[in-house]
Image (cartoon, rainbow, N blue to C red):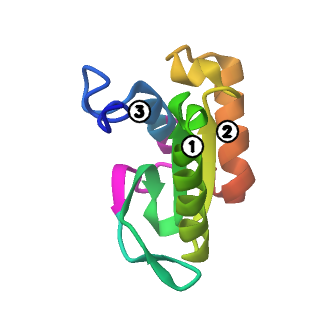
Amino acid sequence: MNKDFARKGMWDSEYRPEQIFVRDFIAIQNITLKINLEYPIRNLKVDGKPYRKCILDIAIPEKKVAIRLNGGYHHVSSRQQLKDELQKEALEQSGWKVVDFDSYKMPYLFKAKYNDKTIKLVKDEITKEMGNTLG
């Protein structure tokens, strides 16, 4: 599978629709937060050993919140699952809170069908990690 499949080569726009939706949702809740898409993080470590650079789908650096949007391809490959787990471990050991949105649990988010149910699920997942900092 082409590594660009999940990123810029997959959609007509530079960012995926679910990235834009979640970013805009957070911005509406708290306009003072700086929200970055495709945010690179370097110098991560797992158990004291260097971990490769990672690019987060969405990041709120001042709160150290990493939001990962996991499409179906995250579940078909045991190699991808291992990479995801190691990345999560590296982020958490560096003080980041990791929020995962899963295509199986939130299919509407990944199909750009944003309704009240999708909005509630997004808010619940983010609030679980960030508390009431969204507003």
Which residue has dot 2 on it?
A: 123
Horizontal and vertical percent position of residue 123 = 67, 39
What whole-number distance in Å separates the C-alpha atoms at marks 2 and 3? Answer: 15 Å
Please tell me in which quadrant of the rendered image residue 130 appears. Answer: bottom right
Task: Identify the element where label 3 is drawn.
Answer: helix
Q: Is label 1 or label 3 in front?
A: 3
Q: Residue at x 70, y 43 (%)?
A: 125
Indicate whether 106 appears above or below 127.
above
Q: Residue at x 34, y 30 (%)?
A: 5
Query: What's the residue type where badge 1 is placed?
Result: Gln
Q: Say whether marks 1 and 3 touch (CB < 8 Å).
A: no
Which residue has dot 1 on it?
A: 29
Indicate whether 106 appears above or below 111.
below
Horizontal and vertical percent position of residue 95 = 58, 74
- Which badge, 1 or 3, is on the more N-terminal residue? 3
Horizontal and vertical percent position of residue 103 = 61, 28
- Which badge, 2 or 1, is on the more N-terminal residue? 1
Task: Identify the element where label 1 is drawn.
Answer: helix
As drawn, the label of residue 20 is 3
State the extent of the magenta-drawn residues as a range: 25-40
Task: Identify the element where label 2 is drawn.
Answer: helix
What whole-number distance in Å separates the C-alpha atoms at marks 2 and 1? Answer: 9 Å
Query: What's the residue type where badge 2 is placed?
Result: Lys
What whole-number distance in Å separates the C-alpha atoms at marks 1 and 3? Answer: 14 Å
Answer few, some or many: residues within 10 Å of disc 1's Cα (few below 14, many 20 plus, some between 14 and 19): some
Q: Say whether marks 2 and 1 touch (CB < 8 Å).
A: yes
Horizontal and vertical percent position of residue 8 = 27, 33
